[in-house]
Image (spheres, rainbow, N blue to C red):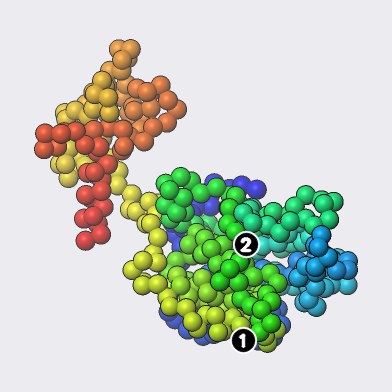
């Protein structure tokens, strides 16, 4: 589902204040029922919720490999529900509690498999959440299908949601995600291996300490994409503490809710051993949408460009005359006279539907042609000072 155009990416977030976060049990793991714990926390107090709820896997008997060895599948009591109706009631209750906790510009992530994600998705929409994206976590090393009677389950689904269709602002660090992806737009399919090797927590017998431990790389991407340093992230199904581990490294604050004492112990030990990154390296690439708007006319008013000056196309074949009101006049290659804004004239000269005039037009400076966007950046630097 695509969000409406009136929702803007992080442009008008409410200011972050230490006073708003002071009453919260920051960087703590609370023991007990997650719904009761969420209902006890202040309303509109957290920036992001990441939820990895029980999947209700409905396993029937033991799962064994071809060599007859037993697969360590998820058969814990916390993943068992008497019926779909019972699971739906549980889901509705925790999603309602989560929505109450989110700030007005907050967001929710929930992860699941085919066993539960469609039920969760329908319920969160019924409660008023607005789905921004569904993300496919494609596992590079999935567990094979041992019986050979189905396709190998090689992915899980994450739903990224805001509180309502009418939410006007939310955090999305588009440039940071693009930077993480070698200057390409980040896609909605993420190839990340499942948790293995040294990252996988083990118990005293050498077995998996938690059956569904998520890779930290997955949570790092979620937090880098939709939070800023200092934001408060709540995880109502804290488990082995992956959300807390990623938050601690990246300079975010966390609140974990967990009812299993052994998982709480493991998570605390894991997080306590983590050394946070230096604050100077956790802030992502700056958002261009948050930069102050500079109209082309400002360049003329500040006499960085004079009326009558010529702007030149990148290939040097089209010249445009700057007018005192910030419009351009140009004769295109077909001899037509075009008048309009830097964007409109550039688009018409190219025969395109749109064009970014800031990066298209050049002006002469110190004997060489440079994009007029460099002049705009100089003004923005003056605003910052």
Q: Residues within 10 Å of mark 1 (few under 14, many from 20)?
A: some
Residue that badge 2 annotates: 194
Question: Would residue 360 be seen by someone viewing this image from the given angle?
Answer: yes
Residue that badge 1 annotates: 265
Distance, label 2 to label 1, CA atoms, is 22 Å
Q: Position of residue 303 (x, y in %)?
A: 15, 41
Q: Position of residue 228 (x, y in %)?
A: 45, 66
**Element carrying mark 1:** helix
Q: Position of residue 32 (x, y in %)?
A: 69, 85
Occupied quadrant, residue 214: bottom right
For the point 83% across and 56% down, which residue is it? 147
Occupied quadrant, residue 368: top left
Residue 151 vs residue 251, the one in the foreground: 151
Residue 153 vs residue 121, the one in the foreground: 153
* Left or right, residue 305 beside residue 183: left
Residue 222 vs residue 270, the one in the foreground: 270
**Element carrying mark 2:** loop
Occupied quadrant, residue 112: bottom right
For the point 27% across and 41% down, which residue is it? 373
């Amino acid at each position: 589902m695509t969000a409406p155009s009136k929702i803007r990416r992080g442009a008008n977030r409410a200011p972050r204040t230490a006073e708003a976060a002071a009453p919260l049990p920051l960087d703590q793991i609370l023991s007990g029922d997650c719904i009761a714990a969420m209902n006890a926390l202040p309303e509109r107090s957290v920036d992001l919720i990441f939820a990895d709820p029980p999947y209700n896997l409905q396993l029937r008997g033991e799962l064994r490999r071809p060599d007859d060895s037993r697969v360590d599948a998820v058969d814990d009591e916390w993943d068992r529900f008497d019926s779909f109706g019972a699971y739906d009631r549980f889901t509705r209750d925790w999603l309602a509690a989560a929505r109450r906790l989110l700030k007005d510009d907050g967001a929710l992530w929930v992860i699941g498999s085919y066993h539960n994600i469609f039920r969760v998705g329908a319920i969160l929409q019924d409660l008023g959440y607005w789905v921004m994206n569904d993300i496919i976590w494609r596992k590079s090393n999935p567990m094979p299908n041992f019986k050979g009677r189905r396709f190998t389950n090689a992915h899980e689904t994450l739903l990224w949601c805001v509180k309502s269709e009418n939410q006007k602002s939310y955090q999305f660090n588009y440039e940071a995600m693009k930077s993480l992806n070698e200057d390409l737009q980040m896609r909605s399919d993420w190839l990340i291996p499942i948790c293995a090797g040294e990252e996988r927590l083990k118990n005293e017998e050498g077995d998996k300490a938690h059956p569904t431990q998520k890779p930290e790389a997955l949570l790092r991407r979620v937090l880098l994409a939709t939070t800023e340093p200092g934001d408060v992230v709540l995880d109502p199904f804290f488990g082995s503490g992956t959300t807390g581990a990623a938050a601690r490294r990246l300079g975010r604050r966390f609140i974990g809710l967990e009812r299993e004492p052994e998982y709480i112990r493991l998570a605390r030990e894991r997080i306590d051993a983590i050394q946070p990154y230096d604050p100077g390296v956790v802030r992502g690439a700056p958002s261009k949408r948050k930069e102050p708007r500079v109209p082309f006319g400002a360049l003329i008013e500040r006499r960085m460009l004079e009326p009558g000056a010529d702007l030149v196309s990148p290939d040097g074949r089209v010249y445009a005359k700057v007018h005192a009101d910030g419009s351009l006049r140009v004769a295109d290659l077909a001899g037509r006279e075009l008048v309009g804004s830097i964007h409109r004239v550039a688009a018409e000269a190219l025969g395109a539907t749109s064009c970014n005039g800031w990066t298209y037009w050049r002006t002469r400076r110190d004997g060489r042609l440079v994009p007029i966007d460099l002049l705009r950046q100089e003004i923005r630097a003056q605003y910052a000072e």
